[in-house]
């Protein structure tokens, strides 16, 4: 399998599994309490799919692949997570009446942690079993 395909596949599996476990199991009650009536009864699948496709592409091609190693990919992922999730949360906090402050903090921290892990796994998968010349 080609290194970039491995990286995208690993990032996709990691992102979807970890994010769904977080949102569906560990933090579901927290998000329900924080968002109240703002939370959709059903997820808009097309919107979720488009988010995952574009976010995984950004993490893989701007976070993981350009990094020189897994540690740097994790650091780049942390920055991407900060920028993406902080942009989302701080904008909502600024313009949506009553946007919960607790959600801002938790969601930014979650975005940093998730994106760090996804970027590191993608870099690992990109490098796995290849000579350095094959990973470009």
Image (cartoon, grey):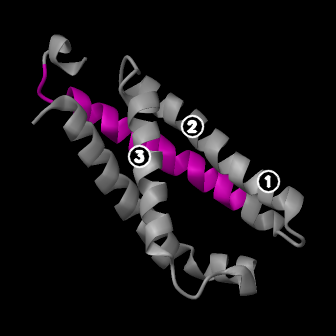
Callout 3 touching callout 1 (CB < 8 Å): no
Eyeballing the image, is 128 above or below 134? below
- Residue for badge 3: 56
**How many residues crowd around disc 2 within 10 Å: few (fewer than 14), some, or many (20 or more)?**
many
Q: Secondary structure at mark 3?
A: helix
Q: CA distance from mark 3 to mark 2?
A: 11 Å
Q: CA distance from mark 3 to mark 1?
A: 22 Å
Locate the N terminus by quadrant.
top left
Element at label 2: helix
Image side of residue 78 versus residue 122, left or right: right
Secondary structure mostly seen in magenta is helix
Please tell me whether mark 3 or mark 2 is closer to you in this view: 3
> Mark 2 or mark 1: which is in front?
1
Residue for point 42% across, 63% down: 49
In the picture of the structure, the residue carrying the numbered disc 1 is 91
Q: Residue at x 64, y 50 (%)?
A: 85
Residue at disc 1, secondary structure:
helix
Q: Label 2, label 1: how many angstroms apart (C-alpha)?
A: 16 Å
Name which of mark 2 and mark 1 comes first in the sequence: 2
Residue range of the region highlighted in magenta in the rendering: 105-130
Is 39 displayed left or right of 128 in the figure? right
Q: Quadrant of residue 73?
A: top left
Image location of residue 96, percent across then percent down: 85, 67
The residue that label 2 is drawn on is 80
Q: Is residue 77 above or below residue 104?
A: above
Q: Give coordinates of residue 42: x percent, y percent.
A: 52, 85
The location of residue 104, given as percent across then percent down, is 75, 59
Is 4 rendered above or below residue 117?
A: above
Q: Earlier in the sequence, mark 3 or mark 2?
A: 3
């Amino acid at each position: 399998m080609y290194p970039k395909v491995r990286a995208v596949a690993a990032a996709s599996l990691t992102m979807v599994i970890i994010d769904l476990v977080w949102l569906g199991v560990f933090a579901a009650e927290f998000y329900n309490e924080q968002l109240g009536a703002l939370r959709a009864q059903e997820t808009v699948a097309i919107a979720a799919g488009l988010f995952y496709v574009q976010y995984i592409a950004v993490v893989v091609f701007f976070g993981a692949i350009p990094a020189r190693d897994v540690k740097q990919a994790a650091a780049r992922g942390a920055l991407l997570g900060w920028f993406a999730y902080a942009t989302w949360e701080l904008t909502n906090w600024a313009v949506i009446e009553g946007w919960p402050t607790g959600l801002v903090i938790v969601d930014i921290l979650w975005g940093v942690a998730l994106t760090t892990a996804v970027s590191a796994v993608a870099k690992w998968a990109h490098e796995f079993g290849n000579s350095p010349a094959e990973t470009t």
